Image (cartoon, rainbow, N blue to C red):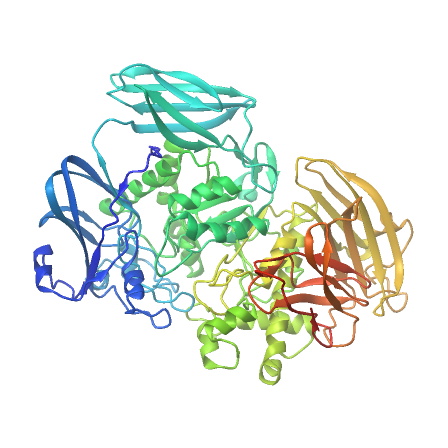
Amino acid sequence: MARLRTVDRTLDGPWEMIVTGPGACAGPGDLDTLSGFVPAPVPGTAAGALRAAGRWSDREPTPLHGSDIWYRTSLAGRGREILRFEGLATLCEVWLDGRLLLTSRSMFLAHEVAVDLDGSHILALAFRSLAQDLARPHKRGRWRPQLATPGSLRHARTTLLGFMPGWCPGVDAVGPYRPITRRGEGGRPTGIDLRASVEDGTGILSVGLSLPEAGGPVMVRCDGRTARLAETAPGRFEGRLALPGVALWWPHSHGEPRLHAVAVEAGGETFDLGRVGFRTITQVRPFAEGLSLAVNGVPVFCRGACWTPPDLVGLPGDRDAYAPLLELAAEAGMNMLRVGGTMLYEAQAFHDLCDELGILVWQDLMLANFDYPVDDPAFRAALETEVAQLLDRLQSSPSLCVVGGGSEVEQQAAMLGFPESVWRAGAVEAMLREGVAARRPDLVVVPNSPSGGDLPFSTNAGVTHYYGVGAYGRPFEDARRAEVRFASECLAFANVPEPVSLREAGLTDPRDPAWGLSVPRDRGADWDFEGVRDHYVGALYGVDPERLRRDDPERYLMLGRAAVAEVMEATFAEWRRAGSLTAGGLVWLHRDLAPGAGWGVVDAAGRPKSAWYALKRAFRPVQAVLSDEGLNGLHAHLRNETAAAIDATLALTFTTAAGKVAAKAERALSLAPREAVTLSSAALLGRFFDATASYRFGPAAHALAHLRLARADGTLLAEAFHHQAGRDATPREIGLSAALVEDRDGVVLRVATAQHALGVHVVLDGEGRPSDNWFHLAPGGERHLALTGTGGRPSGMVRAVNGSGAVRF
């Protein structure tokens, strides 16, 4: 059931914590003889408390699962109260004055217990050794995954974070990482069922709740309109409120994410039920043909990333922790984030912010790779409760759109050679569909990620984890050849952070052995994701990455940053062109789990990397891309995902290596709302021009094609580049310039070039970032870049990958 947004009192202590040997204290009474307690914020983790006390290091995480960890605080009050524990990681006993109240074996379940208070009491939490529990005999699964160890984790309901060597630091999640609250019994609604739907354009709000002490009529209010709830049973009230013309909720790439407050009034009191959004989510095509979503009847290309927690150590769940990262996601044009099965369920604030920002959420169950014992009654019952609590908690969240049965469970078994009868996760899928039908029938269910084809990881069906371009070193053309329908993971690289973050982490030299420790790799593989990035550095720029790393490490890192930006943009340009079969792509990952060259497009300090800027361009709701169609020339694909028509000018310019114009076309056009248009280079030029140098009637007449879509006032909407002669990154004089100038937006950085500038990037002397980075400039082109977070008049330098030096400003 949905929850009241009335804030219960938080049991924030003060709490204290101590680490003991496993089983050293049978009960809280044994704690009185111990010393060494440290202050412990709740919600929080043991690692977070120890870090704050100077007894734990991010660089060398102290193992905690091998110990027992005790928390305690005083609790004062009189009468019956309800204590609620939102999340206890992982094997926890709850004691009140030496009496055991609760035992929990899952960090993914919330618990409520009623207590009778009479003065001052001691509340204690004992987090028992998970390592000791995992070491006891367990029934083995049919397969052992490479991802995580030990195999007995298949029986534990805990995050796999910290158990995945090769790509995640060994940080142990222990403690009351979600809030502990208290409230008086009675006097407010319980059993709340709150559903928002859309029927023939009318918003329908259905409400059910129990309020035995109503003392009069019970009214529901939303969008300035009210309805009376009928008493369908003693103390049970139900009804619905029709809202014709209510503003719908949209992902921010397609409209405004409108939310509407809901309140219930009874007996002179008002109860806040939070906010709802009215929207529909439907599948455009059968799942077997590939996941494809429509919001409010409009097909949406879903783009974004796979989410990671804001801080692996403290596991915070408050708005302040989530907001900077989610705002970066929205700024980059991401309209979907996937919380994968290797992570953990995020707190309510995460979903509230996604509702507000218009970011769709794909939520997996916390199941990944293992052969889980769903045939065990106790495990199955706990998982069913987990599903029910998740859907109840998010019952009124419009951003939640997809729920999945986990990550790579089917893939793991299939890749080990098991037949479909073994790898098909039918039991979990059936459980999930049953829970969704009962609690959130508006959601789309995905059996597992990936799943849907002849093999779970087939690229041309269902959803796939696409690493053809990426880990498998395939050429750019594979993004089309693979016929990807929906990539719920894709494009994993060891993305290099900006210099300021590398300096802070003490990782400035890629030749240092410490550098390699931050580079992710799949367990058991003889390659890592830096090698994947280096492959594309060599393919794009014709250099030897290993020699460059040895002889010029600074340039090696520069080309690494530039290469992943190129690959990101090129892949999504293919997937977003008109005629593409692809309906979505989610990059692995949004943020690094630790400092260094991790998978994240945002680094561990929260700073965007080159890949983030590339995605910001690739994800624009008004987009222009070029595709090489061989003998059919270049095709310009224009897309307007917004609800407003756009009058614009389209220019396609072909230039030589020296910057001389070989051919040019310009056209005024209007893009209707939600419209996609494709124009060939021949149609734009009105004559034959070998735009792809396919006819071989002599040397190519051009080296670069530049497509520019701008408003009538010259404001750039989108642009694209096609490098006919490849990307020549040889440093040379290109006439690059940079200066701070005043324009209508205030002080901006004007960057210009005489010749084509490849991978233009701004490096600020202090904090802050430009509005765009790692972009190309056409011959004679210029850009005005806003600089944010600089704290004053900024300074720095601008460089280009093919430029002979840096330009100071």
Picture layout, residue 261 above or below residue 121: above
Residue 515: x and y in percent read 48, 76
- The picture quadrant where one finds residue 290 is top right
- Asked if residue 529 shows in the view, the reply is no
* Residue appearing at x 48%, y 40% in the figure: 355
- What residue is rendered at 11% in x and 45% in y? 120
Residue 300 visible to an observer of this rendering? yes
Picture coordinates of residue 459, whole percent (x, y): 56, 53
Look at 53% across and 68% down and name the residue there: 494
Quarter holding the C terminus? bottom right
Of 382 and 43, nearer the camera is: 43
Q: What is the total number of numbered labels drawn onto the structure image? A: 0
Tell me: residue 670, above or below residue 491.
Answer: above
Q: Position of residue 648 (x, y in %)?
A: 78, 43
Image-based side of 175 in relation to 21, left or right = right
Q: Residue furthest bottom?
A: 551
Vertical side of 696 occupied by 338: above or below:
above
Q: In this image, 611 relative to 504: left or right? A: right
Q: Which quarter of the rendering shows the N terminus?
A: top left
